[in-house]
Image (tube, grey):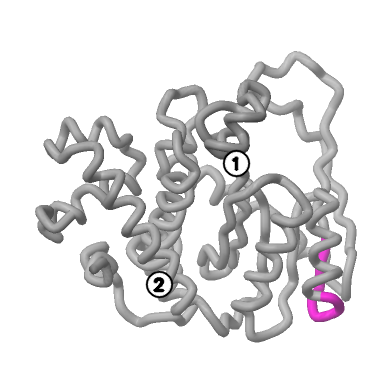
Amino acid sequence: MNKLTIQERATVIRGLVEGNSIASLVRMTGIAKTTILRLIVDFGKVCEDFHDEKVRNLKSRLIQMDEVWAFIGAKDRNATPEMKKEMQWGDAWTWTAIDPDSKLMVSWFVGPRTSDSAHDIMTDVAWRLSNRVQLTTDGLAAYWNAAINVLRNNVDYAQLIKIYGLDESHGKYSPPQCIGIEKKPRIGNPDPDLISTSYIERSNLTVRMGIRRYTRLTNAHSKKFQNHVAMTSIFMTCYNWCRIHQTLKVTPAMAAGLTTELFEIEDLLGFLK
């Protein structure tokens, strides 16, 4: 790590958050794979700590939540019990929460698709907010239970449930056609016009395009859970602080009032010891 200059580190991180694989960066930069992996783990911890310190007391009006599927080592159905226990292989869901106004990624959490994971991200989101918000999720029951247990009555919460047709002519990797939606208020008094998951679903695409290990139908998937978590933290932090949103013309962190300055990746790398 000490042999790389900050410019070399920044080149690697920029390549990673623009969807390049580690193998391609090794070819382009000549930097060893082990060095890049070590940088990912170390810088991932820096980004996680930076997010926890800076993203607090948000005055968000709306929050949307969803989860993105990926896998570590092998898909759940192909991973043996020993692989799952000893190597943490199998399906990995990244739970995300976004402010649709500022496009700020408020929180993320990598874990199984369980009620405990829903509770963890709901707790983290609640900790970062300073006021009551309107929250929208999909129809997953775990969200409703988590909202009741964590946010209680201090939220206007609704679920947006998509209704799919019975036509089975869709492709293998495409969902059935969505023929309608149902908006279900759950807690408080959510505004029906603001019940939406459009922004968080669009951010799912941003994640898949920006993190190579989330790309479907490739062999670029994560092989270690630690690396998967670290790379997710790096991307989310760089997205919030270093990437100017095309619509907003500022970074999400600037739009959310967390800073007035554009951060460069070198600025974040400055916290790396």
Quadrant location of residue 172? Answer: top right
How many discs mark residues in the rendered view? 2
Badge 1: how crowded within 10 Å, few (<14), some, or many (20+)? many
User: At x 75% / y 29%, what residue is drawn?
Assistant: 177
Q: Quadrant of residue 57?
A: bottom right
Q: Of residues 163 and 11, which is closer to you in this image?
A: 11
| Foreground residue among 38 and 60 | 38
Q: Which mark is residue 50?
A: 2
Helix, strand or loop at disc 2?
helix
In the image, 188: left or right of 62? Answer: right
From where the camera sits, is residue 196 visible?
Answer: no
Q: Which mark is residue 92?
A: 1
Q: Are marks 2 and 1 in contact (CB under 8 Å)?
A: no
Image quadrant where residue 136 sits: bottom right
- On screen, residue 219 versus residue 142, left or right, reads left
Magenta region, residue range? 152-158
Q: Residue at x 41, y 75 (%)?
A: 254
From what the image shows, is residue 126 above or below residue 164? below
Q: Amino acid at mark 2?
A: Phe
* Quadrant where the image shows the C terminus: bottom left
**Regarding mark 1 in the picture, which secondary structure is present there?**
strand
Residue closer to the observer: 191 or 119: 119
Q: Earlier in the sequence, mark 2 or mark 1?
A: 2
Along the viewing direction, whichever of 132 and 189 lies nearer the viewer: 132
Q: Position of residue 232 (x, y in %)?
A: 46, 51
CA–CA distance in space, label 2 to label 1? 23 Å
The image shows residue 78 at horizontal and vertical percentages of 62, 21
Viewed as shown, does residue 204 lie left or right of 154? left
Examine the structure image and report whether residue 63 is included in the region drawn in magenta.
Answer: no
Query: Residue 237 placed where, x, y %?
Result: 41, 62
